[in-house]
Amino acid sequence: MKKVGVAILGFGVVGNGTYRILKEHRELYQRTQEVDIVVESVLERNKERAISLGVEEDKVASSIAEVISNPDVNIVVECIGGIGAAREFVMAALHAGKTVVTSNKELVCKYSHELERAAKRHNAGLYFEASCVGGVPIIRTLLDGVQANNITSMMGIINGTTNYILTKMTNGGASYSDALKEAQRLGYAEADPTADVEGFDAAYKLSILSSLAFHTKVPLGKVFREGISGVSQEDIQDGKRLGYVLKLLAVGKQSENGIEVRVNPTFIRKEHPLASVNDSFNAVYITGDAVGDVMLYGRGAGDLPTGSAIVSDIIYAATHSENKYSTFKNNAAAEKDTKFVSDFRSAYYIRLTVQDKSGVLAKISALFGKNNISIVEMIQTESGEDKATLVIITHETHELAVRNAVAKIDDTGVATVESVLRVVS
C-alpha cells in the first residue's frame, strides 16, 4: 500500500481539524483509497499546545527548513493564513518538490501565478479546494464535475459571516451593529471584521472561482466590491414587503460582452433557492450550457468542514500520479484579449427620502426616463415633517445609468437617495 507523509503548517482551528480527520479516518482511507496517509510533521510555535492536542513530541517541528528537509514528508498543508509567512513557507515547500495543499484564499487569489510556476518547475502539486466555500466541493466540481460545459454564470453566498449577519437582521429584526456583535461573540466574525463585511473575503474567492469557471485569469482588481456595512433594517423590511431577501452575493457572468464579476448586497426573490441559505451556510448556483442549473450547499467555514476539503485534496494528490494545473495562462494580470464588463446590467432597489409635495415624483420619474430607467414597482410611506419614503424597484438597466440618475436626484434638493441595492430580476 502506498504511504504518504503529510506536514501541517499551523495548528489553529483548521490545522487541528485537518489533523483530527486524518488521524480518525486513517483506516478508512487505507480501505477505500488504498493509501496510508500519515501526519509526519506539525509546524507550530506553541509546541506544548500541539502536544496537548495529541501530536507526538518528536513530530512537532520548529522551522520550515525542518519540515521540508524531512524525506518522509510528501505533502505540505498550509493552514497559517495571510500572505506573509504562509507565502514564504509555501514557496519553500514547492521549491523542495513537495506538493502543497492550502486553505488560504488570499494567498491563492493574489499569488497563484507565482505558486503554480514554482510547482511546475519542481514537479509538485498545488491544490486549494479549501480556499473557497469551506467544505463545499466547488473547485472540484468546476474542475472535474462540470468541465463538459461552457459555464455562463455563477452566483453564490460565499461568506458565512455576512450571511449570518444578514440572516439575523432578516429573521430576528436585529440592527447591523447588534448582528455583527453576535457574530463576533460566536466566533463567526473577527475582532476586525473588515475583510468579511466589506466583501474582501468574497472577492478573493470570486477571483479564484471565476478564473476556474471561465478558463481565464480574473484578477482581484477586476472584481467590483461592495460590503454590507451600509445595510439598514429599513432596507431589509422594505425588501420583505416586496418579496425579496437580501444576501451578499458573489456574481460571475460570461457572455459575448465579456466577463462580469462583482460582490455586493443583492435582493433576490424569496422563491429563489439561494434565499433560503441562512446563518453561516454557503451555496453556489452554477449555470452551464449543457447541464443547466446546479447548486452546491453546505458549511462555508469551520474546523471540520474546511478540514474535509483539505483532506479531499490530500487524498486526490496522494492517489493521482500526474499533477493538474490551471486550464488557462496563469499570470498576475488578465490576458490582453480578455474583456471585462464594468457597466454591468441589473435591476435596482432605490430608497429615497422625498419632500411630500406635488411634482416631486414627476421630477424623479423624468430623471429616470432621461437615463433609460423604467420602474417595475414603487411604495410610498409617510415619514412625518412633510417628508415621505419612496422605495422603487427598477427594470434591469445599466449600473452607470443608475449612478448618474442618483447623482442628479441628490442635486434636485427635493429628494435624498438613502440606499441603492442591486436586485436579481
Image (cartoon, rainbow, N blue to C red):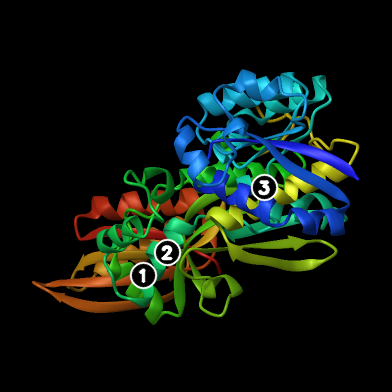
Quadrant of the snapshot with the C terminus: bottom right
Q: Which residue is mark 3?
A: 310
Mark 2 → mark 1, Cα distance in angstroms? 6 Å
Q: Is residue 81 left or right of residue 326?
A: left
* Front in this rendered view, residue 148 or 140: 140
Residue reaching furthest to the left: 385
Q: In the image, residue 241 lies at what x, y percent?
A: 38, 81
Secondary structure type for disc 2: helix
* Front in this rendered view, residue 250 or 57: 57
Mark 1 → mark 3, Cα distance in angstroms? 30 Å
Secondary structure type for disc 1: helix
Kindly check if marks 2 and 1 are in contact, taking CB atoms under 8 A apart as contact.
yes
Residue beneath the point at 42% across and 60% down? 421
* Front in this rendered view, residue 420 or 405: 420
Q: Which residue is mark 2?
A: 164
Number of labels in the image equals 3
Decide: few, some or many residues near mark 1? Use Cα within 10 Å; few <14, some 14-19, many ≥20: many
* Rendered position, 343 above or below 388: above
* Front in this rendered view, residue 56 or 346: 56
Q: Which residue is mark 1?
A: 168
Amino acid type assigned to the residue bearing label 2 in the image: Tyr
- Residue 420 picture quarter: bottom left
Q: Is residue 243 left or right of residue 419?
A: right
Residue beneath the point at 54% across and 53% down? 303
- Residue 418 picture quarter: bottom left
Decide: few, some or many residues near mark 2? Use Cα within 10 Å; few <14, some 14-19, many ≥20: many
Quadrant of the snapshot with the N terminus: top right
